[in-house]
Image (cartoon, grey):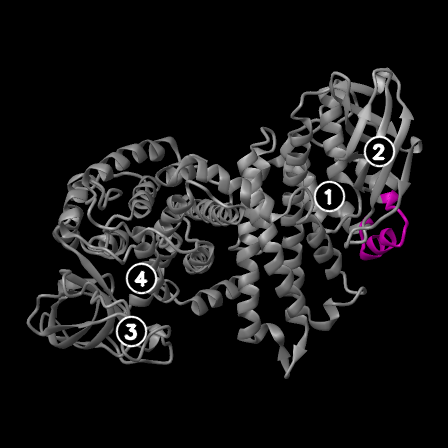
Amino acid sequence: MFQGLTFEPFKLPDEAESIRQEVREFLARELDPGTLPNSDFNAGESAEFSRKLGAQGYIGMTWPKEYGGLGKSFLERYVVTEELLAAGAPVGCHWIADRQSGPLMLKFGTEEQRQRFLPKIISGEYFFSIGMSEPDSGSDLASIRTSATKTDGGWLLNGSKIWTSYAHTNHFMVTLVRTEPQSENRHAGMSQLVVDLSDKNVTVTGIRNLSGEEDFNQVFFDDVFIPDDMVVGTPGNGWEQVMSELGYERSGPERFLSAFRVIVEFAREIESNPSDEQLALLGRLAAHLVTLRRMSISVAGMLGAGRMPLTEAALIKDLGNSYERMVPELVRLSVSGNCSPRFVDTLNECILHAPSFTLRGGTREILKGVIARGLGLR
Amino acid sequence: MNEQQQLIRDTLNRLLTDLCTPDVVDKSEAGTFAENLWQALTETGLTAAGLPVEAGGSGGDLEDSLLVLREAARFAAPVPLAEHLIAGLLLSEQGQSIDSGPVTIASGEFVISADFSLSGKADDVAFARWSTQVVLVAQGPDGLKLCRVPTADVEIVQKNSVAGEPRDTVSVNTQLSAGSVFSVDPQTPERIRLMGAALRAVMMSGALESVLEMTVQYSTERSQFGRPISKFQAIQQQLATLACEVAASQMASHSVIESFSTLNELDIAIGKARIGEAVSICTDIAHQVHGAMGYTMEHSLNHRTRRLWCWRDEYGNEREWQMLVGRHFSNQGADQLWGAMTAL
C-alpha cells in the first residue's frame, strides 16, 4: 500500500477511557439546557464555559505541570475534545489556543512566552485566533503580503488578515507574516508573531456570514509594534512551523463531528416508529462515523507516538468534511412534515454552516492535492 | 502485522504472482478450475490457515486466515477460500476435519429425516461444480443438522455470477450416513451469514487496495495531451477520493478481522455496509481513469471490479446491514447514540 495511507488499528488506552465518564458528568452539570447544542467547533462560544472547562483542567491538559497543565497524554485530550463536540458544547473561545497556539509555544516558543501565555490559556483567560488568510491569499498561503519590518527592539507590522474567527473577542492572534521580501523560495522569509488584539493600531472589522452571525473578521495592522520577544520561534522559519501544526489541526474529531447533533436529533425524530429507510440511513451515517473515528484515533495514536502523519491527517479531513456535508443533505430527505422545532433548528443551523466545513483549515481541493502527493502523483 | 502474518503474506504474494495470473483468472471464467493454484495453496497450508490442526488445519490465528483471503482477493483468485474456511470452521466445531477440498457451503432450504434422507435446494452456491463436498444446514426432526454431502451425490445446474465465478444451483435428494450429520444450534444459519458477510468485507477491502494500485499505476503510464494523465488535477482529485475510500475500507476491514473470532454482529455489519458503499465510488473512479481500456475483457481491472460488484451483494447488501446498524443505535435512544458509538 501507499505510504501515508495506512491506518493501523489503535485502541484508546484505559486512562483515556477513564476520563470519559468524568467529562460526561461535567457536561451534564455545566451545559446550558437553554442553548441548542451544536457540534461544530466554530459555531458556539462562551467565555464562561471555557473558564469552567479550564478550572476543571480540560484546557492545555497535555502541557507540563510547570505551566499549570496536567501532563496528560494526547489520547486523554482526544477523549475530552470528542466528548465536548459530541455534546455540542460551546468550545469556540478556547479551541484554537488549546489545539494550536499553546502547542506551538511549547514547541517553538521561548521560556518567557510559555510562562506568560500558557497558564492563562489553561485557566481559560487568554483566547487566541489564527492569522493566516489574507484578502488576496487563501489556499495559496505562501503568497501572503502582510509584513513586519525590523525596527528598534521589535518589528513594525502592516497589512491585513481575513476570516479570523473571534478576533473581536479573543485576546491574541498568532499571525503569519513576511519578515523578508518574497524570494525564489516562496516558503522562506516568513515568521509567526503574537499580536495583541487590543493594540490601538489593530482594527477588527466584523464580517457577517451567510447565517447572519458575525464570528469572523478582517483584521487590519497599521504600524503595529511587535516587540522582539513576541516572535514565536526563529524569524524566517514560519512556514515550517505552520506546517508542523497540520497533523494536529486536520486529523481531530472536529473534522467529522460538525454535523453530529443533526444525527442525534434525527434519531430522536424517528425514535418512536422508524421506517426501514430511516433505519438504513441512521445505520449508514453511523457506519461512516464509527469508521472515521477509528481512523482519527489511529492518527492520534501516531501523533501520540511522536510521528507526523500529514497525508493521513489530510485524508481524514477530506473524508470527514465530505461526511459532515453529506449528513444534513441526506437527513432532510428522510423525514417528512411535522418535525419538531428542535430538529428543524438543528438541521437548518447545520445547513447554514456546512459550506465552511470544506473550506476552513484547508479546502477540499488542497487536501486532495496533499493526498495525491502521498500517492506519488505530484 | 506480526511475524507469522508477514510470512504468510510474503509466501502468498509469491505464490499468487506465479499461479494467479490474469490468464488463470480468465481460464477459470471459461470453465477451467484453477487446480494448480488450489493445490499450491493447500500444500502450503494456506487453505486451512486458522483451522485447528486436529481438524485438518494449519493452526494459527483466525486472523491469519482472513489475511489469506484479503491477499487472495488482491489477485482476484478464482478459488473458494471463504467457503472452504466457513465449512472448515463449522466442521471443526463438530470435531470433524476438512479434506483438501475445495469444500463449499450451501445456504438454502433443506430437510433431513430421522433416517438421514436429505432433500432440498440452494441457489448461488459458490464453486459447487468444482468442490469435493457441500456443507449445508438442514431442518431435522429435532432441530438443525449440519450435513456434509459429497458433490457427486448432488445435482448441479451451472450458473455464473457477474464476476464469471460459479454460483451454482444445488439440488439434493440423497441418503446420508449418520457420520455425516451433526446436530447444531439454531443460530447456525445466522452465524454462517455473519461469517460470509465478514469474509466478503475483508475480500472487498483487499480487491479495493489492488484497484487503487492499478489505477494509480495506469494514470502514470497513460499519456494524453503530451503528459501522463496523472499530472492533471482532475485525475489527481479523483484518485485522492479513491484513496480516501480505500483507506476507510482498510480501517473497517481491520475491525471486521478483529471481531471475526467472536462474530461481533455490529462490527461486521458496519464493515460490510461501509466497504460495500466504497465499492460503488471506487469502481466508478477506477473505470473512469482507466478509460475504454478498463472496459475491456482484456484488461484485468475487470477481474477486481466485477468481483466487487458481486461480493457487495452477497451475504446481505449495504442496505440490509445498514438497517441492522440503524436498528441497534435507534434502540439505544437518541441521547445514548454517542455513548453507544464510543462503547464499540
Residue B19: x and y, percent? Answer: 82, 48
What is the span of residues highlighted in magenta in the rendered image? B19-36
Q: CA distance from mark 2 to mark 3?
A: 68 Å
Q: Which residue is mark 3?
A: A189
* Dot 2: chain letter: B
Mark toward the viewer: 1 or 4: 1
Q: Is residue A55 left or right of residue B94?
A: left
Q: CA distance from mark 4 to mark 3?
A: 12 Å
> Which residue is rendered at x = 37% and y = 75% of the image?
A140
SS category of the residue bearing label 3? loop
SS category of the residue bearing label 4? helix
Residue B339: x and y, percent? Answer: 38, 37
Residue farthest toward the bottom in the current orientation of the protein: B225
Amino acid tagged 3: Gly
Label located before the other in sequence (4 or 3): 3
Mark toward the viewer: 2 or 1: 2
Label 2 Cα neighbours within 10 Å, binned few <14 / some 14-19 / many ≥20 = some
